[in-house]
Image: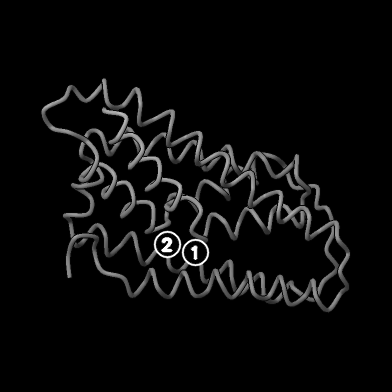
Amino acid sequence: MSFEAWTIFALFWIVFVTTPGPNAVNCINNGMTLGFRRSLVGVLAILTQASLFLGLSALGVTALIAASPTGFFVAKLVGAGFLIWMGVRGWMNASKPVTFEPRPARSVYLHALAVATINPKSVAGYLAAFSQFVQPDVPLMQQMVVIVPTALTLTALSYVGFTALGAGLGRAALGAVFNVWVRRVLALCFIVYGVLLGASSTPGRT
């Protein structure tokens, strides 16, 4: 991969991982309720999902999934229901005091992994990356050696930043009313993402 191609890919990935979505909302919420250090396991889950999707994209599996209307339909309904459930639960719990919950690291990890995996933005983004930036006339492994570290580094920086933002909001003690409305906005985001996911079409199709 040439330096010019790498620069274009890096800029694309920065936009991809810094655009707020379910992962960002989950990181902010974790930071608010768990604190910064305990929330980093959620970032680790996102990196796990990113590594998996990078590998699957290289093998063309995500393209195959996106090409299956039935499989995508089932997956998006399950994902939509999960996100809406998270949003409804978050809205109902918004009026409760924000506390640093002693949630097991395994629970935080699996929850973040589920949110990252069902995110429709992930499938579309990885398909876009591999359809636009992978050069068919260059050995794939040579390109993956550049693409994977770049993507994972930028992903980590982005979601660590969102987690730090959430932790800062949690520590700021800006008032009970403000905290309630911040948490309700985050919950509403999950519901909106779920509705949009349920109404979305297969990437690359209309």
Q: Is residue 106 left or right of residue 46?
A: right
Q: Quick check: 119 above or below 1?
A: below
Residue drawn at point x = 44 percent, y = 53 percent: 15
Point out the residue furthest to the front here: 4
Image quarter in which the C terminus is found: bottom left
Q: Residues within 10 Å of mark 1 (few under 14, many from 20)?
A: some
Image quarter in which the N terminus is found: top left
Q: Quick check: 184 above or below 51?
A: below
Mark 1 residue element: helix
Q: Is residue 35 left or right of residue 49?
A: right
Tag 1 near tag 2, CB within 8 Å: yes
Q: Position of residue 60 (x, y in %)?
A: 20, 39
Task: Return the mark for residue 82.
Answer: 1
**Circle 1: residue type:** Phe
In the rendered image, which residue does mark 2 sit on?
79
Q: Residues within 10 Å of mark 2 (few under 14, many from 20)?
A: many
Q: Position of residue 201 (x, y in %)?
A: 25, 69
Q: Position of residue 23 (x, y in %)?
A: 53, 54
